[in-house]
Image (cartoon, rainbow, N blue to C red):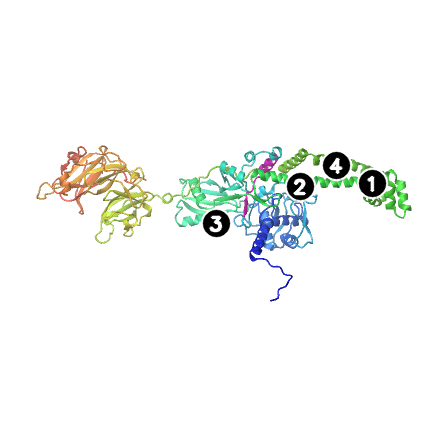
Amino acid sequence: MNINKNLSSISLKDYAEESYLNYSMYVILDRALPHIGDGMKPVQRRILYAMSELGLNASSKYKKSARTVGDVIGKFHPHGDSAAYEAMVLMAQHFSFRYPLVDGQGNWGTQDDPKSFAAMRYTESKLTGFADLLLSELKLGTVDWQPNFDGSLLEPTLLPAKIPSILLNGTTGIAVGMATDIPSHNLNEVLDAAIHVLDHPKSSTKDLLKFIKGPDFSNPAPIIVSSEELKEMYETGRGGFKVRAHWESEGNDIIVRALPHQASGSKILEQIADQMQKKKLPMVVDLRDEGDHKEPVRLVISLKSNRISASEVMNHLYATTDLQKNYRVNINLISLKGSPRVFALKDLVSEWLKFRQQTVLRKLEHRLDQVDDRIHVLEGLLIVYFDLDKVIKIIRNSDDPKKELMKIFKISEIQTNAILEIRLRQLAKLEQIKLEEERYELEKERAELEKIIKSKARLKTYIKRELKEIKNKFGDERNAPIESSSDAKAFSEEEMVTSEAVTIILSEAGWIRSAKGHDVEASNLTYRGDDKLQHFAKGRNNQTAVFFDSGGKAYSLQAHSLPSARGMGEPITGRVISESGVTFEGVAIGTDDSKILISNSAGFGFISTLSNAISNQKKGKQFMRVPEGSNVISPVTINDNHKFVAATFSTQDNKGKVSNKMLIFPIEELPVLPKGRGNKLISISTKAFKEKSEFMMDVCCLAEDSKLHIYHEGKTGGKTWTIKELEEYITSRAKRGRVLPTGYNGMIKLEEIEKTKDAAPE
């Protein structure tokens, strides 16, 4: 096998490592990360330079963008034209750049759709006045130059920026293994901070935060960040903040006038509409985008009524849509040493001032060289006027006047050339006076330049004066207010449910459902097979329904989540975890402070608020301690009731003759407890209870003007009693009660009728 001896070998590992490292450094240094000096990425720098070379300054006429892009990719940036044009578009969009560098004419996109800009053959552009702050000193010896990609032209390595552009317009970029995210800031604040650092080089980040209040974008959307977060962000160069939409209330409408930076209005409307379709925003009835050329952002959110809190709705939308967005901060830049680095605010300002001092020094030294050269020429020219006849004679008679002039007058070649190029009309006395005046002014300028160059204090004063002039010309007020806290909070499932009257129905077999309204005849609904009504309660759709089993446990379900009463419902055991052998005896619904009376067949009970029975656990909450052999009786909701009624089933003798008893006593005698066994309501023989020959059947509460209806369980009819007719049954708690009249033997039910108030308050 023949091997070419001119070839060298390298291991695949070394080749891959070196190639990837070269690629990484190219992406980091020449594509993704900006330089701290001018705040530009290479493509942005080349676009601005190409436009300046085309004479597209702020005072010139617009020129087709395709011309600029052609120059950029043909001379300096050999990449795709679409990438170069998109970078150019970004610098022209006022909603992308805080201080745009390109003045565009035509369709340059909208905040709603930044990519909707027209093709470069349609748009026209030139530089803005602000861009002059980056380019005006380009030809004054301020920067280094490098060959372009084919070596045919030179391009600047940096632009001689008069302002810390990277802080003013910010940037984002993704390199290999690192990224940068820098928000924009207000020019007045940044320049004030730079001036402060010039005067106080040892100032801290805390000192600079007196000037720089935080990021600032091109619209009045508030920035949400605490002082602690700001301090950490600017001290470490890493952090984050939020931006939320700016809105106003007009009648039942919420008018959104400013969106977070780079947020899309159409996307936000889609997000809100999606929630409306899923019935997660019942309080919103309409959405509109009323934006136009005069008011680009105007989103209208119409509420159902003026009783709905617009602030609460917006706080929900902040948490669930792009009306509030999070922004990351990672101040990663190419430093003056040419390597990437994460900068703290103080270090960034100090490093940029170092760059600016170097740039100004180079500009002054370049100007000093020009002044020296011109003075040198003027000194030679003035020789002509001191001995004009001799100069003319040498020029007329000498074979080599240049050499003879240099020898006789002891002047340089440059001075000699200038003398030989003088025209006859410039030999007038007036021209001599002009030259002497020019030399005088240049000598004054040279003395001033030398003072500044030799003195660091004068150099700082010079830069400070420049920054103040820029601030006076281009400075503006802050757009985005800084707010320290966010109230963004999504509505809970219960808060998004409308408050509607409902009747919760529980069947004997433990099937549950919810019927709209309070005028529902629960016993007349259709039930499965032999199943029938066990208990029902009236409440609101946005309340919690609590179901009680025979063992004293309480189970909580949201009323709006229950199946509709148009069907048969569903078994409660599919939603909760209950113990085997228990049955579900009743249901209660109301506000958290609604009072309920809970009791059991052993004759014990107590009053409690509904909140004490509510639990988020599927296995329920032990609410009542039930004596052995007894079970819970359906709960009773207490409103304006003031009398408690208890009825027992009992037999008088061994023959099994039934003699039911009833007891009525003031409800104030019952204790209010969070949970437990409760107190004795009616006296029952312990022996008879164990033998199941005596137990409490049912309970009821009466208001002052309500009546008691007693009927046999499972049957219609019965008798209605007024409070006055029941006086003989009224006594104290824990008594035996009086025997009911003949005809009320067997299992009976008690019911309060003609209530004065709804049992289910809103």
Residue under pointer 3: 267
Place residue 488 in its image quadrant.
Answer: top left
Q: Earlier in the sequence, mark 1 or mark 4?
A: 1
Residue under pointer 4: 446
Query: Is the Cβ of the residue at disc 4 closer than 8 Å to that at disc 2?
Result: no
* Camera-nearest label, 2 or 3: 2
**Picture coordinates of residue 471, whole percent (x, y):** 62, 37
Quarter occupied by the C terminus: top left
Residue stretch rendered in magenta on the structure: 178-195
Residue under pointer 1: 380
Marks 3 and 1, how far apart at CA: 73 Å
Observer-nearest residue: 412 or 687?
Answer: 412
In this rendering, would 421 be left or right of 545?
right
Q: Is residue 138 magenta?
A: no
Marks 2 and 3, how far apart at CA: 45 Å
Marks 1 and 4, how far apart at CA: 18 Å
Q: Would residue 61 be visible to someone looking at this image?
A: no
Marks 2 and 1, how far apart at CA: 32 Å
Query: Is the Cβ of the residue at disc 2 closer than 8 Å to that at disc 3?
Result: no
Marks 4 and 2, how far apart at CA: 18 Å
